[in-house]
Image (tube, rainbow, N blue to C red):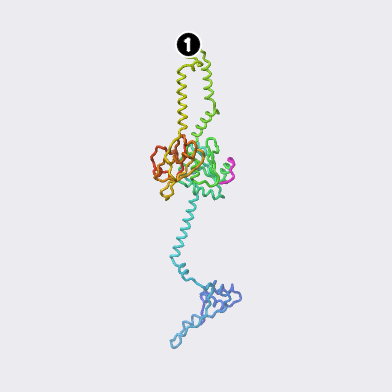
């Protein structure tokens, strides 16, 4: 009885013959049976040159028994391996196990989490940013009496991303911005970004600039990456005074230099009117003429008092202020040290380590030799804090640990 192939196997034989043109049905069956009816494997085996495969015994003959009910011996079969001859059964077992599938899911989840984490690290500081065009940001800064802090970024510069990651994400910087600035960030290739770049003449990105919202003047700018500590130190001027206070002080200084001479003109006119009063009017009023006042004893006493006060002031100015003796800079475990950066009036920046248990009076001892005015004029320190400035006085008995000055920046203010 001839062995009849199922329909599925017939289709595989036909497909084999379409690919291996010129071969017989018997050849197709042999290669397909040798590869457990895997069409791709059979074709690969055929084209690898293994075109001689022993014909397997039909299934019908395997199920036949002789008259003596003795099963005939199993036929001899010769099979050929194909593909990769070396198999890693441990790897195959692992790949087919449900634990592997679960691990793949965990790995995929981990990659997604890592991707989200990286995206959050470099994202813009939306919680600090003003959302709107440049002119509206200026108007908002005027209304709030704050400085306008602008950050021009470029998608082509990785430094823009590091500013988001390191500088704008810093807690102290964020608090300083919330308290003293309206923060506006924009890409240089946008319409608003191009306007600002053209107006302020910037070509290299990224750029940070502080703008006076009242006049639109560029007060200060930085190019490239700016570390949080350096930025806080540089914006101390803007933390100490608002735009309105800055303009009030500017007007006061201009008047003192004669640039706004209205008050001085009025004072001069009043003095001229007094000097033009006739002597007989002074006599009738019982007053002494101005040219004779200098001869009176009262004027002499006033001059003597004035001279004495000037002498006392000169003596006070020339008198050297003595502070606590400064010990050597400690060199021990960092857990016991307090490192402080100090911004001097002459623009220099110095650093020093102190023991956390030392008195903050040693700050005065250290700085008294760093700039000339410190020997004769008293001074104090202000800490770079967002909002209201924190002042440190010499009569304080705080230690460095209790003062909270560790790893901070302070500025010297001459009194």
Q: Residue 352 location, x and y as percent?
A: 46, 45
Please, which residue is most extreme toward the bottom here? 68
Quarter of the figure with residue 257? top right
Q: What's drawn in magenta, residue-wise?
A: 198-205
Please, which residue is most extreme toward the right here? 22
Does 128 lie within the magenta span? no
Given residues 347 and 7, the one toward you in this image is 347
Q: Residue 377 location, x and y as percent?
A: 46, 34
Callout 1: 10 Å neighbours few (<14), some, many (20+)? few
Does 199 lie within the magenta span? yes
* Residue at x 49%, y 13% (from the top left corner): 282
Given residues 258 and 108, the one toward you in this image is 258
Q: Residue 224 location, x and y as percent?
A: 55, 46
Given residues 351 and 199, the one toward you in this image is 351
Please give the residue where the numbered disc 1 appears in the rendered image: 284
Q: Main secondary structure of the magenta part?
A: loop
Quarter of the figure with residue 15? bottom right
């Amino acid at each position: 009885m001839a062995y009849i192939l199922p329909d599925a196997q017939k289709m595989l034989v036909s497909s084999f013959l379409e690919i291996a043109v010129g071969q017989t049905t018997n050849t197709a069956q042999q290669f397909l049976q040798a590869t457990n009816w895997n069409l791709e494997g059979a074709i690969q085996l055929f084209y690898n040159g293994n075109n001689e495969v022993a014909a397997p015994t039909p299934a019908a003959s395997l199920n036949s028994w002789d008259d003596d009910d003795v099963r005939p011996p199993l036929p001899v079969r010769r099979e050929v391996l194909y593909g990769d001859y070396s198999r890693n059964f441990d790897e195959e077992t692992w790949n087919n196990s449900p634990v592997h599938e679960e691990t793949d899911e965990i790995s995929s989840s981990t990659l997604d989490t890592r991707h989200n984490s990286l995206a959050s690290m470099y994202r813009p500081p939306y919680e600090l940013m003003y959302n709107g065009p440049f002119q509206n940001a200026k108007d908002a800064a005027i209304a709030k009496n704050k400085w306008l802090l602008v950050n021009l970024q470029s998608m082509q510069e990785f430094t823009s991303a590091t500013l988001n990651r390191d500088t704008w994400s810093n807690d102290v910087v964020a608090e300083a911005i919330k308290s003293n600035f309206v923060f506006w960030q924009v890409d240089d290739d946008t319409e608003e970004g191009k306007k600002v770049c053209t107006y302020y003449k910037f070509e290299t990105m990224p750029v940070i600039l502080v703008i006076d919202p009242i006049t639109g003047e560029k007060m200060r700018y930085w190019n490239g990456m700016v570390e949080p500590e350096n930025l806080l130190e540089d914006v101390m001027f803007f933390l100490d005074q608002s735009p309105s206070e800055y303009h009030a002080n500017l007007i006061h200084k201009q008047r003192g230099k004669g640039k706004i001479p209205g008050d001085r003109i009025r004072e001069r006119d009043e003095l001229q009117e007094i000097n033009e009063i006739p002597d007989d009017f002074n006599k009738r009023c019982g007053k002494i003429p101005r040219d004779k006042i200098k001869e009176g004893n009262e004027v002499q006493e006033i001059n003597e008092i004035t001279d004495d006060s000037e002498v006392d002031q000169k003596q006070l100015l020339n008198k050297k202020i003595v502070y606590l003796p400064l010990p050597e800079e400690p060199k021990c475990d960092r857990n016991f040290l307090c490192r402080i950066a100090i911004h001097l009036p002459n623009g220099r920046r110095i650093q020093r380590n102190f023991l956390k248990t030392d008195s903050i009076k040693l700050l005065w001892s250290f700085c008294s030799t760093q700039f000339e005015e410190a020997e004769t004029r008293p001074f104090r320190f202000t800490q770079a804090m967002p909002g209201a400035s924190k002042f440190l006085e010499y009569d304080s008995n705080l230690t460095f640990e209790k003062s909270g000055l560790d790893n901070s920046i302070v500025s010297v203010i001459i009194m």
